[in-house]
Image (tube, coloured by chain):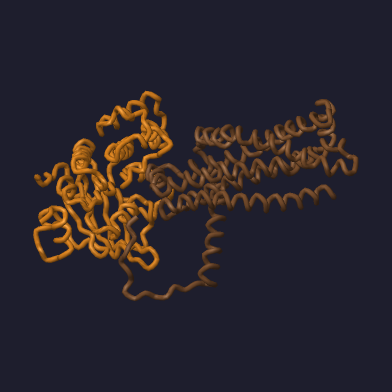
Amino acid sequence: MEEKANTHINKQEAVISIRGLTKSFGDLHVLRGVDLDVFRGENLVVLGRSGTGKSVLIKIIAGLLMPDAGTVTVLGQDVARLSTKELDQLRLKVGFSFQNSALYDSMTIRENLEFPLVRNVRNLSRQDINHAVEEALEDVGLSQTINQMPSELSGGQRKRIGIARTLILKPEIMLYDEPTAGLDPITSVDINNLINEVQEKHHSTSIVITHDLTCAKMVGNRVAMLLDGRFERQGTFEEVFESNDDERVQAFYNYNFVT
Amino acid sequence: MDTNHIKTDEAEPRKYVLSRRLDNLFMEMNEVFQFIVRFFREVFVPPYEFKEIVKQCYEVGVQSLPLISLTGFITGIVFTNQSRPSLAEFGAVSWLPALIAIAIVRALAPLVTALIAAGRVGSNMGAELGSMKVTEQIDAMEVSATNPYKFLVVSRVLATTFMIPTLTLYTMFVALMGAYINVNQNEQTSFASYVEQVFGAITFLDVFASIIKAFVFGFTIGMVGCYKGYNSSKGTEGVGKAANASVVTSMFLVFIEELLSLQIVNAIRSM
């Protein structure tokens, strides 16, 4: 498996910049001073054990959770200081693909895809909406599902539709929460390829939360490992896993590559 | 959400203002208050989700018609039949249509409609919103720059607030029809005579008070169902609890409101 080439990445421009971020839930201190920069055009993979706050991190970036302390700057705006209106404007530029796809059960695939579009883009004709929906479905290779209900789709198809629904607003930043969780290896590779295609086609910046190292290696230009509420290690996949000085990092590698 | 399991080095005992249970009670009361205030803050502000409101009105109103028809009709027949012997003791069976009209219009129709709606619509809202919450569909709406409260809660509460009074009027009609069939079978009362006695017994205040009461019942059922669903947690167990709590709480509140409205209407009558 080849490590990813770094195309379209502008290392001068951090589109997401996090400094001293802390977040607790009662007595549970999940994030304990996170510092992180994500540069324009790159796919950053965030690795870490379950419960270490990976999903909390991207939910803070998307404004779904508020930080206890620290700053989270997304596209030059401090997320915690934005009004509801400003946050909604920012959210149009940030796509979020949920772990369980979060498709609206009571709506068809067409209605799922139209949902963000008709509410956020004004003066669209019916033809424009249909075209955008068909294009987004074509991008994820699932045009035939347009009139189906989410319950009729497989896990992999739901993941793809979830990604298509976020792509329809053409976001600058994509946040993927466990994109390959619960999928078979072949479907996982399809999803990884789709994440790479999205990066290539839309030149988007992405954070991919996962503990699937195959996914990390395939899609990540850079890998950051969340340990004890901080990013202890950052770098390319090889840089993060080449040294044997941390048992937890090594355990991660050994389990995923069965050594 | 990833929230486990990094604990503080020194676990301090949690401090409460009164006690844990009382603090939680007051905090929940505050949350309920904020939830209701948010409805009034958002209901008049565009964008309006007309399509969703119409869809919810159809769910609450049209879809409830078969059940309401059957229940209202049977209530009319049974209540008439059960009231007859008591009136017969005093030789006052001819007062039966008037008695039934007052009972149905003042109390039975709003109450039966509200209880049926609490069971059918309230549980549905609690379960639907609860499952949307635990499967992150509400978060998905939020990150796509859509206000989930307005789309899900405002539309549903508006639907129950306006459809339950409409259904109450319908229940009055079918219950009175059920009562008429019973009266006609037993006393051979003509339809014209029955209608005359019914309208002679009820006043504008009776109908008006019942409709206002039904608005309050509808608002309560919608609010409770949405609040319980919107704030559910703990996975599928939480969804079941939200559905159950929606029905129990809204039925309880409907009876409390019935009692309060009785006092208010009596006070107005005695003025």
Chain drawn brown, letter?
A: B
Q: Compared to B4, does A214 lie above or below?
A: above
State the residue lying farthest toward the right.
B91
Residue located 33% across and 26% down the image: A131
On the image, which quarter does residue B110 sit in? top right
Q: Is residue B120 left or right of residue A46?
A: right
**Depth check: A230 or B125 in front?**
B125
Check the picture and name the quadrant holding the N terminus of chain B.
bottom left
Q: Is residue B122 visible?
A: yes
Q: Nearer the viewer, residue B59 or B243?
A: B243
In the drawing, does residue B225 fall left or right of residue A258? right
Instruction: Report the chain shown in orange.
Output: A
Residue pictured at 26% horizontal, 54% vertical: A17
Residue A219 position in % (x across, y down): 18, 45
**Which quadrant holds residue A109?**
top left
Q: Position of residue B236 (x, y in %)?
A: 42, 50
Residue A170 appears in the figure: no
Which one is in front, A166 or B245?
Answer: B245
| Image quarter of residue B44 | top right
Whether B176 is drawn above or below B2: the answer is above
In the shown orientation, is residue B134 left or right of residue B29? left
> Most extreme residue toward the top, as rendered?
A127
Q: Position of residue B80 (x, y in %)?
A: 77, 38
In this orientation, which residue lies closer to the viewer: A99 or A187? A187
Q: Residue at x 40, y 66 (%)?
A: A26
Q: Is residue A153 left or right of residue B106?
A: left
